[in-house]
Amino acid sequence: MFEKIITVELRERVGKGFARAARRAGFVPGIIYGDKMSPQPVTVDRKQMDKLLQQPGLFNTLYELQVGDKKQQVLPRDVQLDVVTDAPLHVDFLRLSDTTEINIDVPVVFLNEEESEGLKQGGVLNIVRHQIEVRCKASAIPQSIEVDLAGSEIGDSIHISSVSLPKGVASTITDRDFTIVTVAAPTIHVEPVDEEDIEGEEGEEGEVMEGAEIDEAAAESPTEKDGEE
């Protein structure tokens, strides 16, 4: 399990030249800010940063930042990546106390898909919101918001009002009961009809109609014969 401790080193120098030198030496420049304290420029070991980027829920997980002999509680807020190599170029850490309240995006996780009658019948899960912005204390940030799909039918919509949020966590959207997911009817794919097939069908129908006329004539013959008799 990845330990939620990040070791950083304070840096006295700032600027593009120093940042490039730090990257060449195997470090990622960063900054710690917030909680009414002065910003602190830092560097993070590149290998440690690469492991950090592989962790799910990076931007809604609290980490303990080891700065020298002191520890600070932080939330990663932004990581700048190289547009070509995706290598981390810079990282921002937001300094927080347990009582600090923040707005944060939390990913949505869907449970019990196998118990959804609509999905069993071939319905499609139409996800409207992959994450929901909530407001809570730093100590109460949820890893995810769970949406239960058990019993959902085709045509059903699940709204925020039907989701149980953790204690102390509230949606930042309060003026409407927004949709999170719907169970849509399956899409029926209709194969395009070839024009030659249509012409062939019309020809066949014409032959049938001619046959019908012959049958009608044949049907009239007995009547005429009856009259002659």
Image: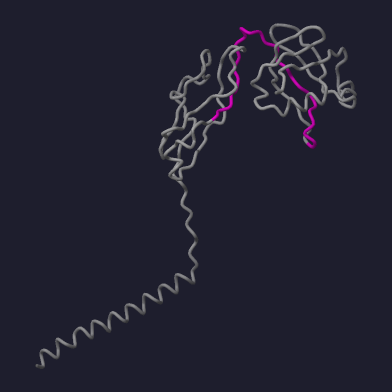
Task: Residue 98: say if magenta.
Answer: yes
Q: The N terminus appears in which quarter of the rendering?
A: top right
Q: Considering only vertical position in the picture, is 138 above or below 22?
A: above
Q: Quadrant of residue 4?
A: top right
Q: Considering only vertical position in the picture, is 176 above or below 181?
A: above
Q: Is residue 96 left or right of residue 116?
A: right
Magenta segment, prevailing SS (helix, strand or loop): strand
Q: Is residue 198 left or right of residue 18?
A: left
Q: Is residue 186 left or right of residue 7?
A: left
Residue 10 x, y percent position in the rendering? 84, 12
Residue 165 x, y percent position in the rendering? 50, 19
Per the rendered image, the range of residues in magenta is 84-109
Residue at 48% across, 37% down: 114
Q: Nearer the viewer, residue 145 or 24?
A: 145
Q: Quadrant of residue 19?
A: top right
Residue at 57% across, 14% down: 136
Q: Nearer the viewer, residue 18 or 138?
A: 138
Q: The C terminus appears in which quarter of the rendering?
A: bottom left
- Which residue in the rendered view is the most extreme toward the bottom? 228
Task: Residue 101: say if magenta.
Answer: yes
- Which residue in the rendered view is the most extreme toward the front? 1
